Image (tube, helix red, strand yellow):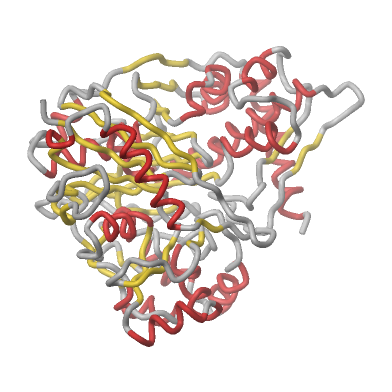
Amino acid sequence: METILAIDEGTTGCTALIVDKNLTVIAESSVDFPQHFPKPGWVEHDVDEIWNATLQAVQNVVRKVDPKKIVAIGITNQRETVCFWDRKTTKPFSKAIVWQDRRTADFCQELKSQGLEEKFQKKTGLLLDPYFSGTKVAWALKNWKEVQAAQKAGTLAVGTIDSFLVARLTAGAEHVTEPSNASRTLAFDIHQKEFSEELCGHLGILKSIWPEVRPSVGLFGKTKNVPGLPDGIPISGILGDQQSALLGQACIREGLAKCTYGTGAFLLMNTGAKAVPSRHRLLTTIAWQLQNGETTYALEGSAFVAGAAVQWIRDGLKMIRKSEEIEVLAESVPDSDGVTFVPALTGLGAPHWDPQATGLLTGVTRGTTSAHIARAVLDGIAFQNVDILRAMEKDLGSKLKQLNVDGGASANNLLMQIQSDYLGVKLVRPKMIETTSLGAVFAAGMGVGIWKNLDEIQSSWKEDRSFEPKMADPEKQKALGRWQKAVQRTMLGH
């Protein structure tokens, strides 16, 4: 049977899957790669380490199938992380600057003080925050001599992780991206669907260094000289990870929403053919563009830390040995006993957008145990999403009835129940919680005609379990009140 190879390039590792037309996962492999922290608030990747992890994951799955039966490759990736490489050789000029990196906070403030935030928001749907790629590129061009020299020589290629992977998969033949990734750069006009000369000018970068933008579904290039893969396999679908999860959750109609719990937590709501401008500090983004040019938009709210808070409990505080142990520890107490945790370990995302905010643990007494802290961490992950969803509802003028959930932490039943309780809506978890990879499969499959349209994708989505709100309203309001006070203290603390 014909198969699809999905490459899911996350923040801490790469997952490769081989999936058939019936969405049966035939082979799967995940390979981690390191993050580099050269200074406080700085986060980098070595793109050769990313490529080596990708090759290893791909070779692991290809051993279990006939690679000649792979008819398409789909890519999904961490979005705002930006790379710098040679157009011909694909050799990197520097480390990649990761989406979590905060080094451009001062530059963002400088652009805001020039009164430019409204202009950027109207054209890109984004706010001026270090999260996005554009200010990272400007910083690299000012501070890294090899990147400067390459721009002068005309050999510099700049792009998000998808662009770098396509360059490597095609032996340097293609410098391309698609709108869901391009719309995260601060340099891409989501209405004109092209990189903006004016915005690049404000950022102090050249428009010519960015990739060519093609529809999310369609041909991006063909494999050449990739160890373990035959030449000529079409790369036929690319989506940024959160938009990919929206497609993988079959949220193909206006008003449908999903939340992915990974390193961060990402809420996206499909707004159809309409780019809804946010009045409550959310992001307007492109969800995907089909081969016929039909474009779907989304509203998004991002919390920078979700699963990363559990990793901190595991690695920093040594309270647990494995991430999944937090559920048992937190469930050993009925609630957090007044302990509140704000997971601002890399600043606060939507709707607060405070890059200087730091994490806060409050309400601790002599009676506080590790179980109460574990429970407060899960509460904190859920509270962030309440703030985002309330802002989303205000922008749309309507209430959400259901939220689809996915990502690694959605396997934590306690966290999902806590989330349902504080949101006051039904949560639905699919059978395949790695919907980010599934979105890449769907995009690639549509690119080669395996699925003819979005309706065929929706019919293949299957539910695993749902969670209904159970918490009494007074208890919920009391906890939310403590959260709001803690957030204010976090933001006032610098």
Q: Residue at x 58, y 57 (%)?
A: 43
- Residue drawn at (71%, 53%), measured in percent from left and top? 491
Q: Is residue 66 above or below residue 327?
A: below
Residue 315 appears in view = yes
Q: How many marks?
A: 0
Quarter of the rendering occupied by the C terminus: bottom right
Residue 310 placement (x, y as % from top left): 63, 32
**Residue 72, position as x, y percentages in the image:** 16, 41
Q: Please report the residue visible at 44 percent of the width from the left and 38 percent of the height from the top.
A: 31
Say if 27 sits above or below 396 in the image: above
Q: Quadrant of residue 268?
A: top left
| Of 430 and 392, the residue lying toward us | 430
Residue at image position (18%, 26%) is 20
Q: Is residue 401 visible?
A: no
Residue 156 higher or lower than 218, as above or below: below
- 242 sits left or right of 194 in the view: right
The answer to which of 241 and 170 lies nearer the viewer is 170
Measured as percent of width and height from the top left, residue 119 is found at 41, 72
Instruction: Residue at the far right: name it.
Output: 366
Position of 195 with respect to 139 (left or right) is left
Quarter in which the N terminus is drawn: top left
Q: Position of residue 215 (x, y in %)?
A: 18, 55
Tell whether 222 sits left or right of 418.
left
Q: Examine the image and state in which quarter residue 123 appears.
A: bottom left
In depth, the one of 464 and 218 nearer the eye is 218
